[in-house]
Image (tube, grey):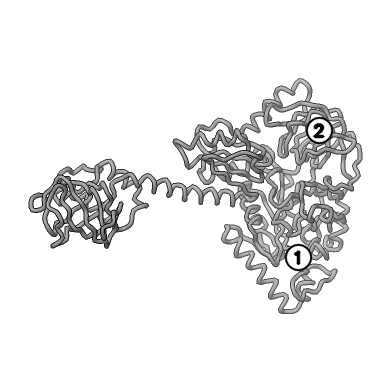
Amino acid sequence: MKLRQPIITFMGHIDHGKTSLQDFIRQTSTAQQEAGKITQHIGCSNIILETIKKICGKLLDTLKLKLTIPGLLFIDSPGHAAFTSLRKRGGNLADIAILVIDINEGVKPQTLECIEILKQYKTPFIIALNKIDLLSGWQSSNSFLMQNINSQSENIQKILDTKLYELVGKLSELNFNAERFDRVEDYTKQIAITPTSAKTGEGIPELLMVLTGLAQKFMEQKLNVNIEGHARGTVLEVKEEKGVGKTIDVIIYDGTLKKNDTIVIGTLDEPISTKVKALLEPLPLKDIRDKKTKFTNVSKVSAATGIKISTPELDNVVAGMPLRSCSLNEIGIVKEELKKEIEEVVIETDKRGIVIKADSLGSLEALVKMLKEKNIAVKKASIGDISKKDISDASISYEKDPLNSAILGFNVELMPDIKAHNVKILTNNIIYKLIEDFEKWQKEENKRLEGKEIEFLVRPCKLQIMKGYIFRQNNPAVVGVDVLEGKVKVDTPLMKKDGNKITEVKSIQKDQENLNEAEKGKQVAISLPKVTVGRQINENNILYSAIPEEDFIKLKELKKNLSEEEKAILKEIAEIMRAKNAMWGI
């Protein structure tokens, strides 16, 4: 058994300084090389023990901390990817996450996304409250962070504390107990916040100390791995390398991988088996995705590490897929295991629900998890852009289950020249926003559909025949009425207080203009067939809509679409009908 490097994922909102913090530690400039200085691809780098000792310097002696871990494995990812791609069966690849928050911007939508995913996977995390050097009036120095904070003006200390406790308050709303790293009493119950600057390096020694201290004290058992065993890993990226061909960047989190080993890699179809042609290891402190990174051709690597693998047959491999090394006679068993693992995430057979798409297996898993928590059924879940087949799968729901005729896409797009037809397509690169948008659409669509449905039902109304406004006695009778409650429509059946239907509204007129309906407060003339004024009806009579029993039952189900007045008349009508039949409408 050997103590492996803890796998550390940097997370946070775009441009809050995730890559810049790592660049300071590695003394690299990866952030400068990314398009728009925003991380485009997932990277990883080995932080050797000597680097940690060098950065922490005298702080190690002051805290009397002896380092036992062999180093750290840093994972950096685009803001939107959080660390969803970094999965292994039953959880997340990261041992600890560093959530980077810009002190001046605070918690942003992607910060909340990261927190939500950390909560889902129960991953421990610490916070780097970054860019303290940009606080107005901040004086940078090379001393320990706490000495530096205490040497600032009273006003600056106040600003820092205000920003820090705004964050503590926000985290408390999300059911997290957080505190500044030097005030933490119990690291198993509180989240440590370390103020940092990726530009000046302030707070970075303290951040590394909190990180290594946590790993050594609480994770030693988890970090013990059998390096003699077969390798287990996760694909970070699939790339085309000049002069090498297609390669995969992989995190090996368990066991040892050797050149010429047989490996099995998961795909969306059948897992593939192939041989390791070359193992290309980035130099220490160098990021695997950095274009200038030099690689060493090695014969074997042990967990935990990031490695570039050159191997044939990579056509169907996508990010987040599991990788295992095995002996030749184990290929069949391993393929079945990986297939089962992928099928737990990629759903194709659920009878009802929505269709979801994501950019990687890990992203898909995170989306499925969060939808399940919200009791949102998923009929199909797969990887890649939204295709014609996806539209077809989702549109099947339209007739019987229109609220599930939808596709949610995380960090994917609709393929060109494809029409949505009766399918609602929602895309976003923030999972919780995607789910929020879907819930909002479902609510609005439900209201629209119920409104449409209610239009075909007899609505509750209450009228009074006005004295002195008998325009015609019969064939049909034409009388003036005052709409006391609800809304009267053409074809509404009418009854008196005895509950017997006597007629229906043939037409409605006001100022010689024909109307389809008249609401509460309106005085209109209505024509009534099959009745004679002076016999079945008289001046001042109160008339109600004669609601059929099946319409009444449906109206009760849809009562949230009725006004309070309509609900009151519905109750009155029910009392009239139940005087004749106690079980009416029940």
Q: Residue furthest top?
A: 329
Label 2, secondary structure: give it: loop
Q: Position of residue 182 (x, y in %)?
A: 72, 65
How would you rate the neighbour count of disc 2 (Cα within 10 Å): few for under 14, some for 14-19, many for 20 or more? Answer: few
The amino acid at mark 2 is: Glu
Q: Quadrant of residue 16?
A: bottom right
Q: Is residue 541 left or right of residue 352?
A: left
Q: Quadrant of residue 563?
A: bottom left
Give the residue at x 78% y 33%. 231
Instruction: Kindly tell me whether residue 250 is visible in this rendering.
Output: yes
Q: Where is the C terminus found, in terms of image quarters?
A: top left
Q: Nearer the viewer, mark 1 or mark 2?
A: 1
Give the residue at x 82% y 64%. 199
Q: Is residue 516 left or right of residue 124?
A: left
Say which label, 1 or 2, has the lower sequence index.
1
Look at the numbered discs 1 and 2 and tell me whether their residues touch, using CB distance below 8 Å: no
Q: Which mark is residue 228?
A: 2
Label 1, secondary structure: give it: loop
Q: Is residue 441 left or right of residue 474?
A: right
Q: Which mark is residue 2?
A: none
In this figure, which residue is indicated by the disc labeled 1?
Answer: 131
Using the image as rendered, state which of residue 58 and residue 469 is in the foreground: 469
Q: Position of residue 499 (x, y in %)?
A: 16, 47
The amino acid at mark 1 is: Lys
Q: Is residue 63 left or right of residue 536?
A: right
